[in-house]
Image (cartoon, helix red, strand yellow):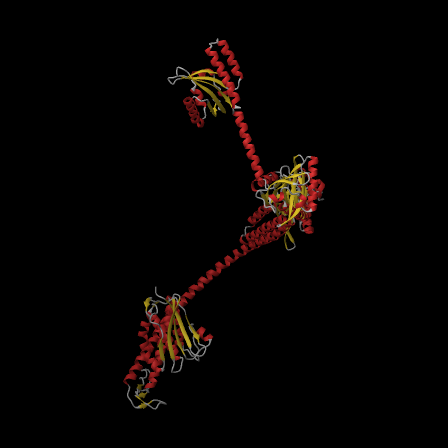
Amino acid sequence: MSVAWVSKGEIVNEALKLLRKLEFPPETITLLDKIAAILPGMIFQFRQQADGSQVVLYVSSGCRDLSELEPELIQADWQILYQLIHPEDRTKFKKSLAVAFSTLKPWHWEGRIMTPSGKLKYIQGACQLEAEANGDILCNGLVIDITPRKQTEEELRTSEARYQAILAAIPDLMFRMSRDGEYLDLKGDGISLTLTKEEIVGKNMRDLLPNDLALIGQETIAKTLDAGSLQTCEYQLPTPKGIRDYEARLVVSGADEVLAIVRDITERKQVETSLQNLAQKFSKAFNCSPDPISISTLKEGRFIEVNDSFMQLSGYEQNEVIGHTAFDLKIWVNESDRTQLVADLQTKGAIRNLEFTFRRKSGEIRTTLLSADVIDLDGLPCILAINHDITARKQAEAQMRLAAQRDRLLTETLVRIRSSLNLEQILQTTVSEVRQFLQADRVFIGLNDYEVKVKTIAESVDPKYPSVLGWTPEDKSYLQELKTIFATHRVRVVEDVSKVTVSPKLQANYQQFQTRASLAVPIMLGEELIGALVANQCSAPRQWQPIEIDLLQQLSEQLAIAIQQAQLYQELAELNTNLERQVEERTAQLQQKMQELEKLQQVKDVVLHTVAHDLRTTVMGNLMVLKNLLENGGVGSRDLGVGEQSPPVLLCSHTPPAETSYPAVSQSIPVPSSVIERMIQGNDRQLTMINSLLEIHCWMEQGVIINLQQVNLNTLLEKILPDLQPLLWQNQATLENLINEDLPLIKTDPTQLQTVLLTLLIYSLQQNPPGLKLALTATVVESMVKIQIEHNGVTMSKTEGDRLFDLYVREPQAPCSTILGLKMYLCRQIIQAHGGEIGVISNRKRGLTFWFTLSVAD
């Protein structure tokens, strides 16, 4: 190819040189240009002079198609052609020119140029170089566009590579076979074969395959060659891996020759079997599902298949559904739901439990939960949808909500009735909340007033409709008709007033107040009709629900209670007014009595202090006299009933009063000392009792006065116990202190605490025989110290223990004297003033345990 166009170029160059040497006229050169224009490419003549300068002698018009440049531009500056060369090819271009000019061998070069319009072209250039006598080098050559050839070559290479890749990527066995079944060649690189290629090529299929398979193969080859079209067959072949399934595709590849492509389809067959089983299971599940299932096209929603449950839910027959859309059947109550469904399926891929309303053929509205997914049926996107009817559940939920609202309304009404006595407020709040609950146009309460017969006293009404508040019918026959209705039916339910037969007066009442449906229940007090609770629907007839009727009935009972309560409150207010007057009178009387009691109390205090003071003075005087007599008496007389000697005491008789007529007599009476001692003890007890009474009286008037200090209990006991030793020796008793040394400090009044401890110890000694054993212990319980005095003496009953610290007068036979009883009462007052407690426990075997508590010091 190159030789051909170079030869033409050489011819043209030679012709140009000859014409110029012979100096033909310009017309001849123009004719040559026309001839050159017919040839493809650009013809040029180039001279490099001896001084290195370069001149373009001639450029044909073919430069326009090749480079999109005019010949004059190239002749003026040939470097403009150099600027069109692709940057990656310029180095090779320069080298090729340098070699040609240095060796004067023919120049050949292929490369790319970028035209001014942006086209990429492949070009090929060649020229002859000739040295002249003057040292110039003359170049005559031709440049042609080889872009189509390059593109064809590239396409051929790409196509060949693609076919080679496809052939290499085919995982199947390929056999070339003759008409009689001989294996001519095979391709099976990378495929595990039982036999090698050498063991297969040249053999007949009858030698390698079972007879039945060989016969089938022979028939398929003949059919392929005779028909000249693709033939397929499937068969099974035993292999070391077990029975495998194969598919053979045969096409004509030459005269009496076929190409067989064999593919192992065992996995495909297994998948097909699994799919068939799955399809059977799906079909059973589809048809037997209790939930409605449908398959419809994604784009239009046209039904392809539905199950029996879908037909039961929709009410349509199968032939009415298949081929139609859900919009044709008007199944979607809200058509925008399907648009949203499709959008969600496209974004999320699947929808679960989408709640929507479903319209049946009868027009009945049902609520279902829709779960859907997109499936592919033979390349057609479809929606597999499952509907679960939850209408019953939604109705139950609605009933439960209504019941909850009803119970809340009843409860709140009951609370208002119990917490408020404002009947007007109770009735107005009730009608407002009932209207909101019922979504009715009007709810009102009418009461039977004995003065004006009947009057509407509470109402809640939609502003669009007339009000009945304050309405009072005067017609007695109309009122009697209403009473008869309530007495007969108890509940008046009218769903459409135009379909009931009523009196003209009642019909006029419906028209006056635009009533279309009515629900009324009487308000009864026992058997007496005192009013009615009425709900009206003015916009349209209405079917009243049982729960709504039940609500009004229960509210009417509560309203009857509220009305009765208001009546009772009015009566109570009247009684209260009378009672207040009586209370004021009784209060004045009580104040007068209180003043009298206060005067008596003052007199009692004066008498108590006077008598106690005088008695105390007398007893103290007697004690002083008796003690002096005991200390100063003589010895010589014997005590009555006692064998020991006692000092004689002489008692002198007093001189009789002056007004008597008897003569004065003075004589001494001997008295034993034991008698004086008993008299002293008696006076001591009387003095102690008087002091206790005065102390109790003082505490009752002013309270127990204590001076709290932080006290160490063991330190306090060291001061108290020595004073008790004589009393312990006298009663042959022992006292053991078991209180720990590390016991925390306690908050107490030391003097008062000493009184409590001495009183409890003396009580224990006086109430028990000699030989008593006592023990002192103390424990910390939270922020309190519990102190115990335990002995092994006699016990007491629980009743005696409960009364031991009470203030009461003991009987003469009681084991505890009056003085000790007063002292025990004082102990309780002291401990309680400390913020503690005191008590006694009777031990199981014998003895008692006295205990009291005091606060731990901070």
Quadrant of the image occupied by residue 336: top right
Point out the residue furthest to the top here.
25
Where does the image place residue 773, in percent across and percent down from the top left? 38, 79
Where does the image place residue 683, in percent across and percent down from the top left? 35, 79
Give the camera-side residue of 742 and 246.
246
Relative vertical location of residue 809 with respect to residue 69 in this rendering, above or below: below
245 relative to 710 in the view: left or right: right
Q: Residue at x 31, y 74 (%)?
A: 718
42 relative to 757 in the view: left or right: right
Q: Residue at x 30, y 81 (%)?
A: 625
Give the camera-side residue of 776 and 685.
776
Relative vertical location of residue 527 with respect to residue 67 in this rendering, above or below: below
Relative vertical location of residue 379 with respect to residue 764 in this rendering, above or below: above
768 relative to 264 in the view: left or right: left
Residue 539 makes an appearance in the image? no
Quadrant of the image occupied by residue 727: bottom left
- Identify the image quadrant of the C terminus: bottom left
